[in-house]
Amino acid sequence: MIVKGIIFDINGTMTDILTDEADDEVYRVISNLMSYQGILLDPAEVKQCYFQTLQEQRAANVERHPEFDAVEIFRKMMTQHATDFTNALPAAKLEQLPRLLAETFRAASRFRLQLYPGVDETIRQLHQNYHLAIISDAQSAYAAPELNAVGLSSYFDPIIVSGNFGYRKPDERLFTAALKTMKMESAEVLYVGNDMYCDVFGAQQLGIKTVFFRSNQGRQEAAGAEPDYIIYNFPELLNAIRFFESR
């Protein structure tokens, strides 16, 4: 096999991340920030609005693997609870506020974001010889900033984020979009992920060879999904590539 490109998942594959959207402290932070915009909701009301709108989005989404839109959740919250003070804010600020609220929500709910051991060195090495890309189940307000925060954003093109499409992996359209942008065939690409269903099953629908990183996150088993190679620490990916290139 001639490997020309490698597509990666982010969270649970390259980054070890921990978030807790149920933490009440998250909604205290959002409530306080919204009060400066003239929107007066106590933390419990913010939490209720957030999860109610999330459920409504998912119920209205007809996709088999629906994705939500965090920015739109906060845009709706602002629209429903705007006051005269809110509406008098500069138009440019009003336009940016939903994204800022989404970013703040993520920041407040995030308790850990770090690379798994060896990721940085491995990616730097691979970037010299392979076209690297990303397909991630994430929000546009989160994915690129978090990738930048761990120092990896410059190595990948394209960065496919499910929040921009309205559906998540294993939807094959995400993999097709990456291949199209990379201008490569499925037989020329490897996919590296940590979820047996979303990543392994998703990639294999298009005939993409898969490397499963058995990390501390993601589904470890899925009916009908069997990875082509398994690694237990990230630098073993170099051995996996040599294995495929020798076949």
Image: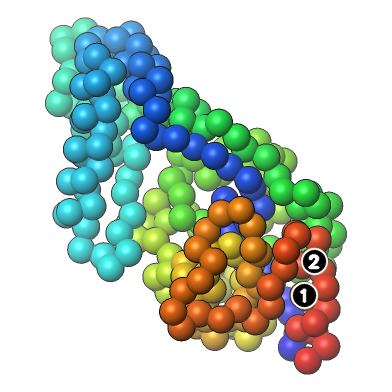
Give percent across and percent down for residue 79: 18, 27
16 horizontally vs 99: left or right:
right
Depth check: 53 or 164 in front?
Answer: 53
Classed neighbour count for the residue bearing mark 1: other residues with Cα under 10 Å, few (<14), some (14–19), many (≥20): some
Q: Mark 2 points at which residue?
A: 236
| Left or right placement of residue 224 versus residue 14 in this view | left
| Crowd around label 2: few <14 · some 14–19 · many ≥20 (10 Å) | some
Q: Residue 7 carries which label?
A: none
Residue 50 found in image quarter: top left
Q: Is residue 168 left or right of residue 185?
A: left
Q: Which quadrant is the N terminus positioned in?
A: bottom right
Q: Residue at x 67, y 40 (%)?
A: 114
Above or below: residue 244 compared with residue 134: below
Give the percent coordinates (x, y) of residue 208: 58, 81
Q: Which amino acid does label 1 sit on?
A: Ala
* Quadrant in which the C terminus appears: bottom right
SS label for mark 1: helix
